[in-house]
Amino acid sequence: TGSNLSFAISDSIQMKVFYRIPDVPVYRDTFTTFPLYNSQYQFNNISINRTGALQQANFGSVHYNIGTDQTGNMAFLNPLAGAMIRMTFPTISSILQPNFIKIISAKLQIYPTSGTYEGIYDLPPNLYLVPTDRNNSLGGSPLSDGTSAQTGSLAFSYNNFPYVPFYIYDVTAYIQSYAASPTSANGDNGLLLIPATSSMFSSYNRMIMNDGRTDKVPM
């Protein structure tokens, strides 16, 4: 003889908690059913564990700008944990030499840190670059390609195996604006790398990237 094990598939789940009630003359076994689609019985919690570099950098609501020199030369994008990546370009003004003519084209490629996006740690499919100030305020619309907002166009580099994912942006207009106004190229201004606002606090996607001290980011 044999036995069959089957599972029912449904759009709702019931959790049963079995317990025993001391009764006379014997114990009485019973259970309570919790329908998980009923919000009255749901318990949802997101725990944040900042053990390690982020904790040592005292990352939080007060210290909201933490340099990558305090986080192991890595930047963290995880909106659910209150972490976004801010990029600055303090050396842009160095290109404004006497023989400087003009900026024709500038593209920025962002590579997630190898080993941080396998398994359950999915990368955000779309990421926007939004101008920001010293307070990390969103300073207008995301960088555009001239027609629509750029999303990074998450793709894979097939030059090596395993294939390496990366985001790419045309930042020509952004860099040209700095060249036209060199004093704006300081630590107060930069770009926030953020997901779409519609998924910012509803998705577990996250990304970790190295800074320019450890990775030579193509630009």
Image: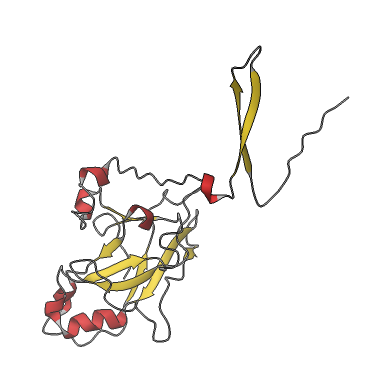
Q: Which residue lies furthest to the top in this view?
A: 25
**The N terminus, quarter of image:** top right
Nearest the eye: 36 or 150 = 36
In front of the other: 79 or 115: 79
Q: Which colour scheme is used?
A: secondary structure
**Residue for point 59% across, 17% down:** 22
Q: Position of residue 65 (x, y in %)?
A: 20, 58
Position in image of residue 55 (x %, y %): 25, 43
Residue 180, given in percent of the width and then of the height, sits at 18, 86
* Relative side of 216 to 90, left or right: right
Q: Residue furthest right?
A: 1
Judged left or right of residue 86, residue 33 is: right
Can you give x and y, in whole percent of width and height, for residue 18 in the image?
61, 28
- Residue sitting at 40 percent across and 65 percent down? 195
Residue positioned 11% across, 84% down in the render: 98
Judging depth in this view, the residue of 204 and 119 nearest the camera is 204
Looking at the rendering, which quadrant does residue 214 occupy?
bottom left
> Vertically, is 141 above or below 7?
below
Which quadrant of the figure has residue 198?
A: bottom left
Q: Which residue is drawn at 29% across and 67% down?
A: 192
* Quarter that holds the C terminus: bottom left
Q: In this view, does 120 lie above or below 130?
A: above
* Apparent side of residue 14 relative to residue 155 in the rendered image (left or right): right
- For residue 66, side relative to residue 9 (left or right): left
